[in-house]
Amino acid sequence: MRFSRLNHVALAIAATAALSVASPAFGQVTQQAKEAGRIQDQAALAKTAQNPLATIVTFPFQFNFNNGVGPYERRQTTLNIQPVIPFPAGDMTIISRLILPYVSIPVGETDAVTGFADWSWSLFFSPKPKGNLSWGVGPAFSLPFATNPEALGSGKLSLGPTAVLFWGPGNWTLGAVANNIWSIAGDSDRESVSKFFAQWFINYNFGGGWAFGTAPIITCDWKAPSGDQCVFPVGAQLSKVLKFGTMPVNVLFGYYTNVEHPDGGADDQIRVQINMMFPQ
């Protein structure tokens, strides 16, 4: 009996020693696995942030600094508050995209008009994606909620079709969003509205949440005089997914120069975006 107990004690001591030797290596492997999982998670979130049809709630704040505006070549600033909320609906997803632009428009040499401009609201009806390809169509609205209708708004309720296409093969994301709206109601003393918006994008994801690409925004006011209707930018942007506590945030910095713009329009734009993401 005594010999058996001594054997058990010896085995217990040996097992404890073995675990003490192995635990640093085991802990290192576990830490490496966690780090690999974190990097993969960041890479997936980076592609999600670039997908207009992603089925998670996102809350981007996009700052646009437009330089060289008006006869005094001043800076116009816009903060676009853009909550995106998906709703499951059977075999498809309905994605609500609201844009609340808070703008500061230069007037004269030193003054500016500041406040909310007209709101933009789009609804995309998107079937379940097939592989890496997804698409959506629906209505786009311009809502006359400007805080200063004369200086910052159209005074019109406008409506038109919108569409989006997204393709995400491998490390790439490519696609486009476009709409055209026409005024259907509003102040009869204000000019009618016919405006076009398009944003195409292409990004390469390096891993770890880093991405490099371009996403220029093309706009046209078809009621403006010929030659002063459209803005065509060219540029690039860099983004990174970070974690603030448990919340992933996609931070983006971009620069675009306008190769064509109306008389008095901006020469270039600096874009900074902070996109809070809420994965389910």
Image (cartoon, helix red, strand yellow):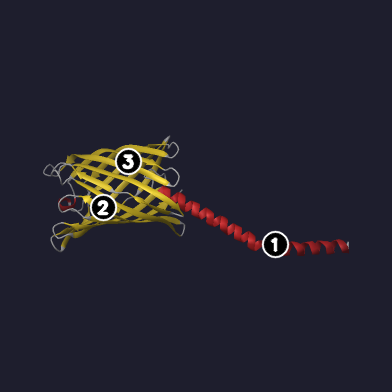
Q: How many marks?
A: 3
Q: Report the residue marked by disc 3.
A: 123
Please tell me whether mark 1 sits on a helix, a strand or a loop: helix
Above or below, 197 relative to 79:
above
Q: Position of residue 68 (x, y in %)?
A: 19, 58
Please tell me whether mark 2 sits on a helix, a strand or a loop: strand
Q: Report the residue marked by disc 1.
A: 19
Q: Label 3 amino acid? A: Leu
Residue 31 shows up from this direction:
yes
Q: Which of marks 2 and 1 is nearer the N terminus?
A: 1
- Give the Cα distance between marks 2 and 1: 60 Å
- Give the Cα distance between marks 3 and 1: 58 Å
Q: Earlier in the sequence, mark 3 or mark 1?
A: 1
Q: Position of residue 43 (x, y in %)?
A: 46, 51
Q: Where is residue 66 in the image (x, y as percent from the top left)?
A: 23, 56
- Give the Cα distance between marks 3 and 2: 18 Å
- Structural crowding at the residue carrying mark 2, measured as other residues with C-alpha within 10 Å and reported as few (<14), some (14–19) or many (≥20): many
Q: Report the residue marked by disc 2.
A: 101
Q: Which of marks 3 and 2 is nearer the N terminus?
A: 2
Whether residue 102 sits left or right of residue 242 in the image: it is: left
Whether residue 262 sits left or right of residue 240 in the image: it is: left
- Structural crowding at the residue carrying mark 3, measured as other residues with C-alpha within 10 Å and reported as few (<14), some (14–19) or many (≥20): many
**Is there a contact, CB below 8 Å, between mark 3 and mark 1?**
no
Give the position of the N terminus as an image quadrant.
bottom right
Residue at 12%, 41% (x, y): give it: 188
Q: Label 2 amino acid? A: Pro
Please tell me whether mark 3 sits on a helix, a strand or a loop: strand
Q: Label 1 amino acid? A: Leu
- Structural crowding at the residue carrying mark 1, measured as other residues with C-alpha within 10 Å and reported as few (<14), some (14–19) or many (≥20): few
